[in-house]
Image: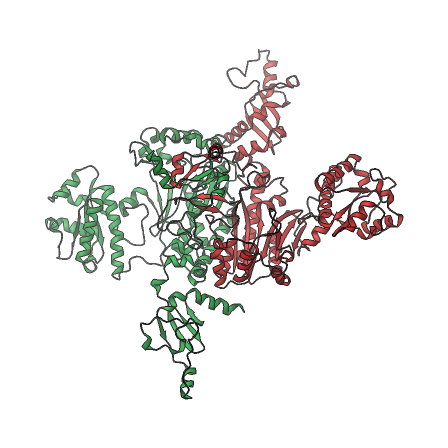
Chain colours: A red, B green
């Protein structure tokens, strides 16, 4: 009863692609039976939608569009299926370029039947369950739900609003349970965790979701190393059995180190090509722009080594690399073949003395056929540029068949000692929190808060996996006075909006800290999915739409009345300006 | 370092109550030491906020308001604490009427430190964890998160709206994942569950929350008994060890039975006092209003027996019962003392013949001192009235010291065979779903959908615990045609809004059904808490406010602009009407 319906229905779901390209598998016994008995072949496709039976398709039909009806006999992934009717079988190839993501999202309930989606969602469920066992059963954490209808946070410009029935009063959907988990520590819950739904309205962003999920954790009487060990154990315990086990402890680098070595705060440490500072080699150089750079404050000469670059990189690759550097960083890039005798595109390299060449080969550990990309300039800028080129070249080499990043390898890294503050983009004289205003300063930098706050490091830590930030957290400020000083004096925030939190700290907060892991991103990496949308049952498109149900949708005015709001179309506001 | 701070801070948190009533425990050694040495007693309270030291309070201070400063030496629950200073100790009694719920919610982070709140939240966490083990590890359910930014459902008047950045387009916060879990069944996930956050905007409602949590479950290829066994096992497995174990299977009654027996669809089955139909006793009665009632269609005579009512109910109780019946149900109530010789307030009862009296004693199983409350009228109305009186009288008897409802007893009951449709309140000729439009009709009533839909029963089931509905669910419609017929033809709904669901059913849905348990209510009953707010870490007040952070709050107009909405104050709309 039920089974054939499922299949024939599914076939109809895929019917558009199916109609396109079809190839016969074998001729129809039934038909040949008829032929042998010398009778005229009846018209099996009269009065119905099909143009042909499955059995009658031949190479002569190549290029024709045909419509078939029948049952799915066999199906593999979403690549091909075998369709059957009374007359025979036909193998149907589903053109991959036609099974676009928009179509997948529109028919999500069919897409969920695919092996990959079933695997992703079941693995996600199992991994989260193991995390819960580790936290609740092994380490005494309390799973506590916190509200999602809350108050907007200072500068919470990315928070969705929810109109209430009180005129002009709104809830907002929080970006994280940050305040609540700190209040729970004040409340003596000691160890909190939640698989927390969070909300962020960033408009259209590829591979971001307006609602997302984080493993949210907070502990009392803990320090940075305590949180790090907890998370290492958590990932080790919950890691899928069909993957190589997670090796702990994870390596740790400071923010300054990763920037100098990889030119980014979330480096992909599955491969080398590290940034090397070669300033000393050129202290007495005659090459003008190197002299120039080194004479300036923070002026450096840095380089990365592209293994077998001479073999795999084409002249036009080098060109586009140099153009990229010039266009996006206003920086000069020198490609240098230290071992080979070729040197096109880098006349300046001729001025590199033999002693310098040998010293560079030693520093950069270059082999025959390697290419060195060299740049000079301000430290941070040079590092950022080479960090970008490192990834660009890795992509290039891999398109040429070199395997630099083992897809089965999971390379975790802790990044610590971030700056506590950053200069505000709009006004660099003012400060803003590098992460959030509740982050505790580095113990050895507290005095800097009152002298050179810009130089103060924080107790914030990021967890990086294969070049992706999958988690971040910090030890928090548990002293009300310090929190007030940072909010009011240093950040010039409106403390009234956080009075409840400050008051709570006044009533005696334990030292505490926590972390949040981005669950969607983590599962995406573990399953090797191209997008986080592949690990979410019903994701929004990158425009924030639910393509299956056509969401968001318009609402009749009478349903807006109880919330005391009116829609002001852009045209309206233009009209307003006109007046 | 940390510990004293916590306590002194806490003391400050409670300082207002402390200032009120204080009683000395023992005099001050230090003070008597001074006295013995004949020196003048110095003024220890000069220059500071305190009016007295802890040591100097005597009965002579009775009635005075004093201010003390010190450390908390000892504290029990939130009822009293011992405050200490250099001069002595004083026992402080915290007036219970002063620690109001509003105050508790405002200082929630302090309230969370109480034994009761710690117990409630930790029990909730453990019970949910056990539920997850049972569903995921023992029965192969997949924990799947579904979106909370979705499309409003037909007639979803109680759904919060979330403005998007597209002019006039809104998300809405769903009241349950109903549509998604059915789509997951279409998607072949087979067994889904989620501890789901749900939203319902009912304005001000006591003991309701705008956001709440349900254990949300859906299964493929299952029937009603399958779901019932699953839930019985779930509660048995997750039940706290410090309570009596849950006995399964739970008893089942039909909607018609519970209404006739208890006058409600969520009866408290911890005690008897069932409604008895005594119509037959009065077939040939001479009592006018009984004759009258029995002559009408659905006319009945019904009664409940109040055990030892003659002993515990006062004359004014009977009066208020009769007034309640008259005012709210326009019904006559006869109190009858079948065994006693008293009969005040019920002259009519004199006309009850001896044979009828004996028959009633047999039917009602009355004892000496019992009181029978008798009423006559239309079946449903008489049952509803006696159902209300049953609970009223139970409350009355318990205030008089009779224990009818054992607080340690958990009495579960399945209620089944609900009607599928109800007449619309605004227009009784039209139908609306008794629960929701996806509920499957009772297998033996399908033919009625096309003849007398009003009479069709559904495959909906409720789980009742001690008089509270703690869960409900149904077998769903998995046939697209039937679903279309019910939505469009019977309910006159706009099917366009559900086209994605109907299309999904078209593509082949397995037979499926599910249930949702109200987690907050369940934990509230298990912990014996007076309100669901006592099992939620940060609940809203009954007006939907977060009293700690003052939420909802006003939002500056520039933050409304991206969402193309404007606040229209009630005054504005009045002005509109004026024009």
Placement of B543 over or under B65, stated as above or below: above
Q: Give the quadrant of residue B123.
A: bottom left
Report x, y in % for residue B484. Answer: 41, 29
Query: Is residue B429 shown left or right of residue A473?
Result: left
Report x, y in % for residue B415. Answer: 35, 45
Q: Is residue B195 visible?
A: no
- From this viewpoint, which residue is outermost toward the bottom? B37
Q: Residue at x 25, y 53 (%)?
A: B392
Give whichever of B32, B199 is nearer the camera. B32
Q: Give the quadrant of residue B102.
A: bottom left
- From this viewpoint, which residue is outermost toward the right? A354
How many numbered markers are drawn?
0
Query: Is residue B304 shown left or right of residue B459?
Result: left
Report x, y in % for residue B366. Answer: 20, 54
Report x, y in % for residue B483. Answer: 41, 31
Q: Give the quadrant of residue A21.
A: top right
Query: Is residue A326 shown left or right of residue B450?
Result: right
Q: Is residue B502 visible?
A: yes
Give whichever of A104, B92 is nearer the camera. B92
């Amino acid at each position: 009863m039920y089974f054939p319906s499922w299949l024939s229905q599914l076939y109809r779901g895929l019917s558009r692609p199916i109609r396109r390209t079809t190839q016969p598998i074998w001729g129809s016994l039934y038909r040949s039976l008829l032929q042998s008995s010398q009778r005229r072949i009846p018209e099996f496709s009269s009065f119905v939608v099909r143009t042909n039976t499955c059995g009658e398709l031949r190479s002569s039909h190549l290029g024709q569009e045909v419509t078939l009806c029948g049952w799915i006999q066999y199906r593999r992934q979403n690549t091909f299926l075998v369709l059957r009717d009374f007359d025979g079988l036909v193998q149907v190839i589903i053109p991959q370029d036609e099974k676009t993501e928009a179509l997948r999202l529109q028919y999500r309930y069919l897409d969920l039947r695919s092996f990959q989606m079933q695997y992703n969602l079941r693995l996600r469920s199992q991994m989260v369950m193991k995390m819960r066992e580790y936290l609740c059963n092994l380490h005494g954490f309390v799973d506590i739900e916190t509200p999602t209808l809350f108050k907007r946070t200072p500068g919470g410009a990315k928070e969705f609003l929810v109109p209430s029935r009180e005129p002009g009063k709104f809830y907002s959907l929080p970006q994280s349970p940050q305040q609540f988990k700190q209040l729970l520590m004040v409340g003596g819950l000691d160890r909190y965790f939640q698989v927390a739904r969070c909300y962020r309205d960033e408009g259209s962003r590829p591979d971001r979701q307006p609602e997302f999920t984080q493993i949210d954790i907070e502990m009392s009487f803990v320090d940075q190393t305590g949180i790090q060990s907890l998370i290492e154990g958590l990932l080790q315990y919950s890691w899928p059995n069909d993957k190589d086990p997670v090796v702990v402890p994870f390596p740790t680098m400071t923010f300054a180190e990763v920037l100098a070595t990889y030119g980014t705060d979330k480096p992909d440490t599955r491969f080398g090509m590290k940034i090397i500072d070669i300033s000393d080699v050129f202290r007495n150089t005659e090459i003008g722009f190197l002299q120039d750079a080194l004479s300036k404050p923070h002026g450096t000469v840095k380089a990365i080594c592209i293994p077998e670059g001479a073999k795999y990189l084409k002249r036009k690759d080098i060109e586009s690399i140099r153009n990229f550097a010039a266009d996006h960083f206003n920086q000069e890039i020198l490609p240098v073949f230290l071992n080979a005798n070729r040197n096109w595109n880098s006349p300046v390299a001729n001025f590199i003395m033999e002693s310098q060449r040998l010293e560079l080969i030693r520093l950069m550990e270059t082999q025959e056929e390697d290419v060195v990309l060299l740049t000079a300039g301000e430290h941070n800028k040079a590092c950022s540029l080479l960090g970008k080129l490192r990834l660009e070249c890795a992509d290039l080499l891999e398109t040429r068949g070199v395997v630099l990043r083992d897809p089965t390898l999971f390379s975790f890294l802790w990044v610590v000692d971030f700056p506590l503050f950053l200069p505000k983009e709009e006004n660099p004289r003012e400060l803003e929190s590098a992460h959030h205003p509740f982050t505790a300063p580095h113990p050895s930098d507290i005095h800097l808060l009152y002298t050179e706050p810009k130089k103060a490091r924080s107790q914030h830590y990021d967890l990086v996996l294969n070049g992706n930030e999958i988690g971040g957290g910090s030890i928090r400020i548990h002293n009300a006075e310090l929190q007030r000083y940072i909010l009011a004096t240093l950040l010039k925030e409106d403390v009234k909006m956080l009075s409840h939190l400050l008051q709570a700290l006044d009533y005696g907060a334990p030292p505490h800290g926590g972390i949040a892991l981005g669950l969607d991103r983590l599962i995406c990496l573990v399953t090797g999915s191209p997008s986080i949308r592949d690990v979410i049952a019903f994701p929004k498109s990158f425009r924030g739409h639910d393509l299956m149900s056509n969401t968001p949708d318009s609402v009749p005015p009478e349903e807006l009345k109880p919330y005391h709001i009116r829609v002001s179309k852009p045209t309206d506001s233009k009209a307003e300006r006109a007046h």
